[in-house]
Amino acid sequence: MAEGIAFLKRNCICGVLGMDYVGREVILNGWVNRRRDHGGLIFVDLRDRSGIVQVVFDPSHAPEAHAIAQEVRTEYVLAVRGIVRKRPAGTENPELPTGEVEVVAREAEVLNPSETPPFSHQDRTQTDEFIRLKYRYLDLRSPRMQANLELRHLAAQTVRAFLTEEGFWEVETPILFKPTPEGARDYLVPSRVSPGNFYALPQSPQTLKQLLMVAGVEKYFQLARCLRDEDLRADRQPEHTQIDMEMSFVEPDDIFDVVERMLQRLFQETIGAELKIPFERITYAEALRRFGTDKPDMRFPLELVDLTDLVANSQFQVFSRTVASGGQVKGINAKDCACYTRSQLDNLTDFAKQHKAQGLVWLLVKEGPVLESPVAKFLSEEEQAGLIERFQARPGDLLLIVADQPAIVAESLDWLRREMARRMGLIQPGAWKPLWVVEFPMFAWNEEEKRWEAEHHPFCMPHPDDLDLLDTDPGRVRAQSYDLVINGVELASGSIRIHRRDIQQKIFDLLGITPEEAEKRFGFLLKAFEYGAPPHGGIAPGFDRLVMMLAGEENIREVIAFPKTQRAQCLMSGAPCEADPQALRELHIKVELPPQE
């Protein structure tokens, strides 16, 4: 096709063709998904965003079109004019929505040829991700990625429609701003017109959405782009999107109500799943006690059992010494798993060690009931009976116990709990178990630096019952903060915010932020609090992580059009890359690289 010359412009899309189109002439544009030469007839599966349809090229009916079909290959861009007909009996393809019909080509035109792709859509999952990210524009043509992009679009539109109906305004906040205290490194942008000064790309619009509440917006939302220079993993990217929300004159229940109804509608309209509301709620302390984590997966009933008091004076010194040193002894009951072989039990021990535990004590519950294990001889009859009762164990159960410092016990048993649920088949496909985790601690103690740090961020309002503890026992202060967890994934975090300058300054004081530093970093916000700031609060569900869950994907890169690797690199474009020397001179920046090791 010569540049600038008109082409066979489509009047129909591939995926809609069915029996009601039989006898009609259509013009299709798309990519060659597959070509098959049957020694006369040539069959081309033509693909566009809507789907695939079979096109037949018959040399006896359209020799010129057939000649073109002889030359096309996979991923050629092709235009076809033809008649829709019913496929001959026995040749239907029930796997395609268009499988009852085919298009008999009368005319064809190659709109653009294609080199042989480095991988095919059929073997996408077997292709190294490095290759797929390098040729991301080809990877995005695959049905799986097309479906994920469409799902992401539908999710965004559903969120926007729901929040608009609820009276929210969508307001954009700046990308070039000041640092926000979110716990990760900022991406810095140098200012050419203010040499030596830098903008910070927002880790979140935290202070800005609070200012919108001061401004009287009352209900704000934004599909906000957030950027954090942090270590990456499967569900984290350096730039991500969150459903940023803030409301005035609210309490936590008001925020929970809006989010629950939004997610209920979102799950229904995107994947047809029903979320029951209201969601279950537990406190942070209860979550750690029962599950060892503040983001428990509630789809299965395995819970941690505290044995510390039962074994404090045990002759089994692994238990008694741990308790004496301030540690804990906890475990889980793997029902009907006493049939595990020694090899399987050794494998579980290795698994626990991989997640910080020094070891794993296993006890098989036999008829009697009695306990069978290399350590059983060190446990008195009273202790064994107490363990069986505490675990509510019965013959055939497997008791798995970790003795260590509380943080290690919690982390290792959290991992072990999830691993055993997988091995035992306790997770039902398609099950959704949302959970609110509330009453987080306001502060965490940094032992190395001997100071308090904000558990979430320094703008969370303390629980009203704990305000007096700010002066006497900060470690016991609960924040009016909350996390939304679905199937063990933290989906959102939020809080009621501080709206009074005196309380905000007291929090800064506890965190070691001097009045001078607070004024320098947050003076604009503190000043705004002096002009009638309303009580307000909000939340920010992670949009990418949410779409990942809806799509059934395990990696967040599968629902982002152009993601970065775990080294924050774009393999397709080569970013990040060296800056132009002239641009650096204009910015008054000199690059000094660290010495190579």
Image (tube, grey):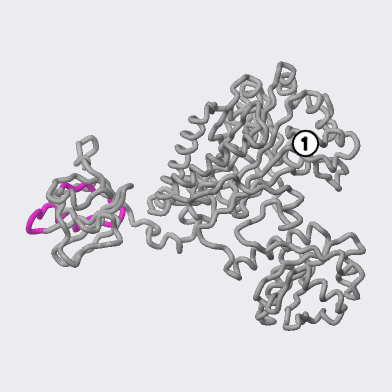
> Can the viewer see residue 170?
no
On the image, which quarter does residue 388 sit in? bottom right
> Please, is residue 577 above or below residue 487 in the view?
above
On the image, which quarter does residue 187 sit in? top right
Residue appearing at x 73%, y 79% in the figure: 364
In the visual, does 97 lie left or right of 178? left
Residue type marked 1: His
Q: Which residue is mark 1?
A: 463
**Which residues make up the magenta segment?**
59-81
> Can the viewer see residue 501?
yes
Residue situated in front as seen by the camera: 398 or 582: 398
> Please, is residue 525 above or below residue 540 in the view?
above
User: Residue extending furthest left?
Assistant: 60
Residue situated in front as seen by the camera: 364 or 169: 364
Alpha-carbon neighbours of circle 1 within 10 Å: few (<14), some, or many (≥20)? some
In the visual, does 507 lie left or right of 215? right
**Is residue 127 highlighted in magenta?**
no
Residue 99: x and y in percent read 24, 58
Residue 152: x and y in percent read 46, 44
Looking at the rendered image, the quarter that the C terminus falls into is: bottom right
